Image (cartoon, helix red, strand yellow):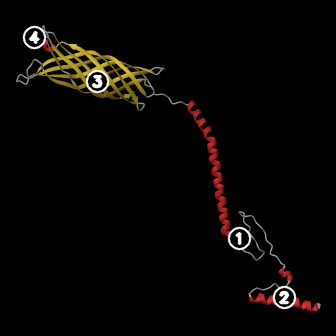
């Protein structure tokens, strides 16, 4: 019975081997070969298990390893950027405080208005003038004709400023302007006779006072004013025109303005002035008993540009 059992086991193994050969598989020659196991080593790589066979298995994919390394490189850059950003946020207040300390230690010097200056100006003048002749009207009535001159003016000015420690600025200025300021009206008792008024020139000598807001200086001004004023009768006859009045006036002027220093040298201004030149007797009536007078007042608006020395 034992030899028969051994033969039966041998027959079973032979039959199994035949079946395996039919399907293309070769049975290991002995039990030792069947029991041989393939050692496996686990290597950590991003949570994946890689089997390395001793002489049999596949080698790790180099492209996959490269991609893993690339991800590590970008991850390092992102970490570095985060650290740099956090450092900048922390140090920003420190830098601002240092900058404030530097600014407090070295303040920018304010503009100094002290010194001489000269410049040009132009603008518009609106005049108010009236011609009065007692008893020259119809039936011995008085004649009072408005002869208001209006027009453009332009001229030069020169002055000096002194800025005080409290930012008040005191100064003096003189100006002279050529005027294209005239008016035309009908003489009330002269038929077709026209009266032409003309302000030939004007000027002033004034004091100024202002308060400096660094490069901006609002100011007020007042002083003596002078002007040359003429009245002419345009008859329209062969005898020609007749000069009725040609006098220099002396009066007073007040005004206010604002100057701004765009650079250390150049200063722009805008200024309003009111001038009252008073009244004078009509020149043509000199030596006569007739009471006459011609008065003159002006409102000027001027802009100008000055150069500081």
Task: Give the residue drawn at x 85%, y 91%.
Answer: 11
Residue nearest the observer in this picture, 244 or 142: 142
Mark 4 and mark 2 in contact (Cβ < 8 Å)?
Answer: no
Q: In the visual, does 210 lie left or right of 95? A: left
- Mark 1, residue position: 60
For the residues labelled 4 and 1, the Cα–Cα distance comes to 132 Å
For the residues labelled 1 and 3, the Cα–Cα distance comes to 97 Å
- Mark 4, residue position: 140
Picture coordinates of residue 22, whole percent (x, y): 75, 89
Q: Secondary structure at mark 3?
A: strand
Mark number for residue 13?
Answer: 2
First along the sequence among labels 4 and 3: 4
Q: Secondary structure at mark 4?
A: helix
* Furthest residue toward front: 1
Task: Give the residue drawn at x 64%, y 42%.
Answer: 90
Q: Secondary structure at mark 2?
A: helix
């Amino acid at each position: 019975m034992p030899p028969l059992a051994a033969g039966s086991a041998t027959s079973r193994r032979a039959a199994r081997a035949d079946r395996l050969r039919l399907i293309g598989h070769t049975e290991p020659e002995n039990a030792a070969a069947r029991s041989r196991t393939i050692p496996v080593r686990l290597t950590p790589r991003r949570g994946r298990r890689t089997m390395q066979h001793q002489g049999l298995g596949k080698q790790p994919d180099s492209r996959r390893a490269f991609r893993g390394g690339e991800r590590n490189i970008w991850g390092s850059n992102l970490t570095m950027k985060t650290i740099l950003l956090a450092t900048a946020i922390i140090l920003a207040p420190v830098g601002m405080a240092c900058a404030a300390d530097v600014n407090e230690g070295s303040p920018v010097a304010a503009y100094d208005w002290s010194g001489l200056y000269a410049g040009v100006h132009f603008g518009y003048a609106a005049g108010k003038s009236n011609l009065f002749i007692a008893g020259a009207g119809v039936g011995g009535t008085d004649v009072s004709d408005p002869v208001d001159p209006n027009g453009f003016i332009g001229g030069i000015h020169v002055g000096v400023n002194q800025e005080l420690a409290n930012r008040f600025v005191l100064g003096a200025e003189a100006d002279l302007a050529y005027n294209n300021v005239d008016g035309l009206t009908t003489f009330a008792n002269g038929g077709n006779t026209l009266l032409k008024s003309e302000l030939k020139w004007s000027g002033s000598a004034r004091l100024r006072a202002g308060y400096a807001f660094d490069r901006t200086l609002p100011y007020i001004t007042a002083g003596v004013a002078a002007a040359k004023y003429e009245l002419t009768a345009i008859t329209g006859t062969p005898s020609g025109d007749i000069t009725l009045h040609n006098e220099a006036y002396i009066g007073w002027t007040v005004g206010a303005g604002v100057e701004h220093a765009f650079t250390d040298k150049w200063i722009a201004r805008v200024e309003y002035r009111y001038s009252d030149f008073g009244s004078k007797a009509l020149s043509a009536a000199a030596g006569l008993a007739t009471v006459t007078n011609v008065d003159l007042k002006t409102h000027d608006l001027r802009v100008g540009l000055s150069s500081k020395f």
